[in-house]
Image (spheres, rainbow, N blue to C red):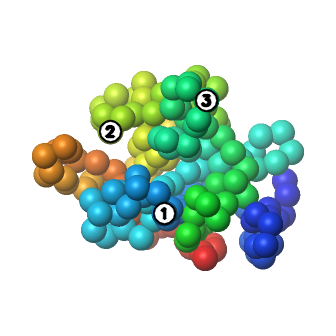
Amino acid sequence: MFACQHLPKNSKPFPVAIHEGDIVFRRGSSLASRLVLTADKAGIYSHIGIIAQLNDSFVVVHAVPGEENTGQIEKVKIESLSSFFAPDKAVAGAVMRSDLSSDSLHRVAQKALKLYYRNTPFDNDYNLNDSTKMYCSELVWYAFKTAGVDITNKKRSKIDLPVFQGEYIFPSDIQTNKKLKLIYSF
């Protein structure tokens, strides 16, 4: 386990130890990020992922649309912490930690990795009742459910727009969980 991960070039070293099951948040500058923040009135972050250990390094497991230029389907992906927080993707970010046991957080991280290995597609319908596809907040919520925890405390955001109507989980629905401790933000 590495004690320190690093942000991209021209960034300060990441000042905290990262652990499996940590939750990472970012606010981007893309159109998708602006749309999430417009819909989520309480939100300061537009995207979320889970830290998992893969071999000798930590990776971020997350579901995000529109970052692949390969012509393949959008799906759950893994990337380095420095790539997740790269300046072209993140204008702000945070790391939060749950008070769950390390065994429980390992299960959470393993569930997130299984979603990656299963090639789980991105959920463009944002449907919480369908676990065959995932959007970012849904992935985090679903992985924590495997440890018996509703990381949202059953909080849902109701949207009533012509394009989207229903209840969704936004990053803020997870970030406001009082059992999460802020480890780092920029």
Query: Where residue 126 is drawn, which disc sits there?
Result: 2
Callout count: 3
Residue 32 visible? The answer is yes
Seen in the image, is 32 located left or right of residue 61? left
Q: Is residue 147 above or below residue 40?
A: above
**Marks 1 and 3: CB-CB under 8 Å?**
no
Amino acid carrying label 1: it is Ser
Amino acid type at mark 2: Tyr
Relative placement, left or right, of 182 versus 42 is right
**Residue 36 lies in quadrant:** bottom left
Q: Residue at image x 61%, y 29%?
A: 70
Q: State the CA–CA distance, disc 2 to disc 3.
A: 23 Å
User: Residue 181: x percent and y percent?
Assistant: 55, 71
Q: In the figure, 12 relative to 102: above or below? A: below
* Residue 31 x, y percent position in the rendering: 40, 55
Q: Could you say which disc has been placed on residue 185 in the image?
A: none
Query: In front: 84, or 106?
Result: 84
Q: SS at mark 3?
A: loop
Residue, x 64% and y 65% (percent of image)? 87
Q: Relative to 97, is 126 on the left or the right?
A: left
Residue drawn at the location 42% of the way across and 70% of the way down: 44
Residue beneath disc 1: 29
Label 2 CA crowd tier, 10 Å (few <14, some 14–19, many 20+): some
Amino acid at pointer 3: Thr
Foreground: disc 2 or disc 3:
3
Check disc 1: other Cα within 10 Å, few if <14, some if 14-19, many if 20+.
Answer: some
Q: Which residue is mark 3?
A: 70
